[in-house]
Amino acid sequence: MSFQQLVHDILEPDLCTVCGACQLACPAGVIGFDGLEPVLTEPAWTESDCGTCGDCLTVCPGADPATRQSEERLFGRGRDADERWTGIFSEVLAGHALDAGVFEASASGGSLTALLQAAMAVLDVDVVLTMGRDPEQPWRAAPAIARDPAELVETAQSTYQLAPYLGALRETMLQEPDARVALTGVACHIQAMRKLQAMDTAAGRWARDRVVLMTEPACSSNTRPEGTRSVIEQRAEVPVESVVRLRYREGHYPGEVSVRTDDGQDHRVAFWQAVRDFAGNKTHRCLSCGDWMSGLADVSVSDGDPNIFAASAGDGERAKHGRVFVRTKAGAEAVAEAGARGFLAVSPVELKGLNLGLERKRNRRATYERSGAPIPAGPIPGHREELETVDDERWIAAPDGSTERAWERGEEG
């Protein structure tokens, strides 16, 4: 196998998640990214240089997230049909950060940020990987390495944009091999890290020994950078070159897209409008994804409001919080320590009712399962979504009854 096999099996059928695991796992360090696409960084590199190495394909979650195998290692069993979309967990709690700055900066209460801060403060975590912004183009998502709990406040919020991610840990792995690492990532990031931890390679051994806590937000689907660019240029009506700061859910819950420009002005776009624009800027892999949460993180968190689209459009209001799914021993320890040390408040919550992000995900997955197109494996072998599908437009109809979309008007994306 070789990088060319990755191209054939993953890139050509559009199954790349842009997780960056291939960059992290490559023993030779010759895989990088051109935008959202994995590429060889050595122009003279050939298939024969890879030899028998296929680590990039082995670690890739694009076609096979290997959920069942990871669950067997973590829990001693795979999930059953009732756990199809939530995964295996020991308890689910309502949670929010106790620090006012984290709470205000967060999208849904800051539970993940509070857990990561607690991990750095009391669980001897040295490095945290989180999604930040590109310093050269602040409107673009980019991985960020935090070494101080205070640094996590600026990234204490959902980022609705694809960017190569796990490869940012490569320098830590090589230059600080004894550092204890925690990370937050969506389903494909967590699946890739669990696959890496199962590999008998130098990178796999490092991941098993040094990546000590993984957290994840629920993910309906992610968006190409063009989706964010469209919101900035067509909705906020400012050039992306003028952007100095971007937040996706700023202000009164559930928040608005906030764009700060180099003249000091803040421009706001209703979150429901951004969601509609994002819908036309997805990859095939994200649209056909079989996961809302990987179920493989130590702790997962979904928004406490099951329909933030409706809340953004003015239909009801809930208290800002997240639903915290505790899965592993490491996750339970992190939640307990975060609570005991004043980082996180939790209380029992009943898991019931519709969640818009999950329903959109289930509908898309059912559609793709019937399409015959190459799609990623789901968490339960052979399982298919048996439901009457609903067009995505019905889930995110404009509150004024309009059906127009940015991409139908010929806007970028």
Image (cartoon, rainbow, N blue to C red):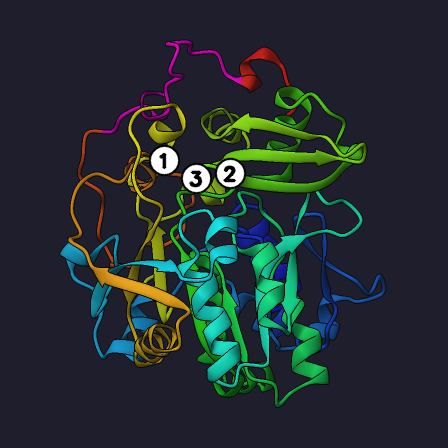
The answer to whether residue 411 is seen in the rendering is yes
What residue is rendered at 60% in x and 86% in y? 202
Above or below, 257 against 390 in this view is below
Amino acid identity at mark 2: Gly
Q: Amino acid at mark 1?
A: Ile
**Magenta part mainly helix, strand or loop?**
loop
> Crowding at label 1, few (<14), some or many (≥20) Cα neighbours within 10 Å?
many
Q: Quadrant of residue 288?
A: top left
1 and 3 marks in contact (CB < 8 Å): no
Q: Is residue 189 above or below residue 316?
A: below
Q: Which residue is mark 2?
A: 251
Residue annotated with mark 1: 308
Does residue 23 show up?
no
Per the rendered image, the range of residues in magenta is 389-405
Residue 319 at x, y percent in the picture: 31, 43
Label 2 sits on a secondary structure element that is: loop
For marks 1 and 3, the one nearer the N-term is 3
Q: List x then y, in percent, for residue 287.
A: 43, 39
| Side of 24 where 89 appears, left or right | left
Q: Amino acid at mark 3?
A: Leu
Residue at point 70%, 83% (across, down): 174
Going from N to C along the chain, the mark reached first, 1 or 2, is: 2
Q: CA distance from mark 1 to mark 3?
A: 20 Å
Q: In what element is the residue under mark 1?
A: helix
Q: How many dots with numbers?
A: 3
> x%, y% of residue 271?
48, 30
Q: Which residue is mark 3?
A: 287
Report the side of 34 relative to 88 (left or right): right
Viewer-side label of 2, 3: 2
Q: Is residue 226 above or below residue 134?
A: above
Foreground pick, 107 / 210: 107
The residue under the point 76% across, 27% down is 239
